[in-house]
Amino acid sequence: MSDETALPGFPTAPPPPPPPRGQKKRRSPLVLGGMIFGISPLLFSLVASIFVDDALNESTALGSTPLLMFLTLPIGFVIVMVGLTTGARDMGNQNR
């Protein structure tokens, strides 16, 4: 305990804990789910364009589905933020 860099009268900092072995931190499924939900109208139209000739024409019902992204993108963004904050909170609780 004769560390020359330590201040006299103060204990030295404990060593950091070892990293967990064989365990991988699993992310919240809300992050991926929010991203998929946000772009789901576009994905739906692109998949439908494989089977329907004029799927991306705005005068058809399938062509107007990307406009739904005005609703799904903000909701998906909120879902992703909730997933990230709960994941950060869980990581903070795990370090205690």
Image (tube, rainbow, N blue to C red):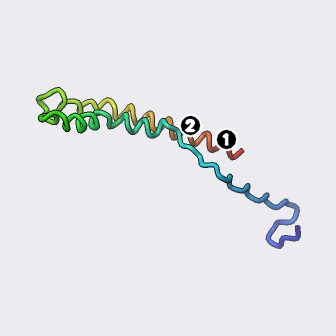
Q: CA distance from mark 1 to mark 2?
A: 10 Å
Question: Dividing the picture into quarters, in which one does residue 61 lie?
Answer: top left
In the displayed structure image, the side of residue 45 where residue 18 appears, left or right: right
The correct choice, above or below, for 92 with respect to 67 in the image is below
Query: Looking at numbered disc 2 in the image, what kind of residue is underneath it?
Result: Thr
Secondary structure of residue under mark 2: helix
Residue at 27% across / 34% down in the picture?
Answer: 44
Query: Residue 5: x percent and y percent?
Result: 79, 71
In the picture, the quarter occupied by the C terminus is: top right
Closer to the camera in the image, 61 or 71: 61
Question: Where is residue 68 drawn, in percent x and y?
Answer: 27, 30
Q: Position of residue 15 (x, y in %)?
A: 77, 59
Q: Residue 75 placed where, x, y %?
A: 39, 31
The mark found on residue 86 in the picture is 2
**Image-based side of 64 in relation to 10, left or right:** left
Mark drawn on residue 93: 1
Mark 1, secondary structure of its residue = helix
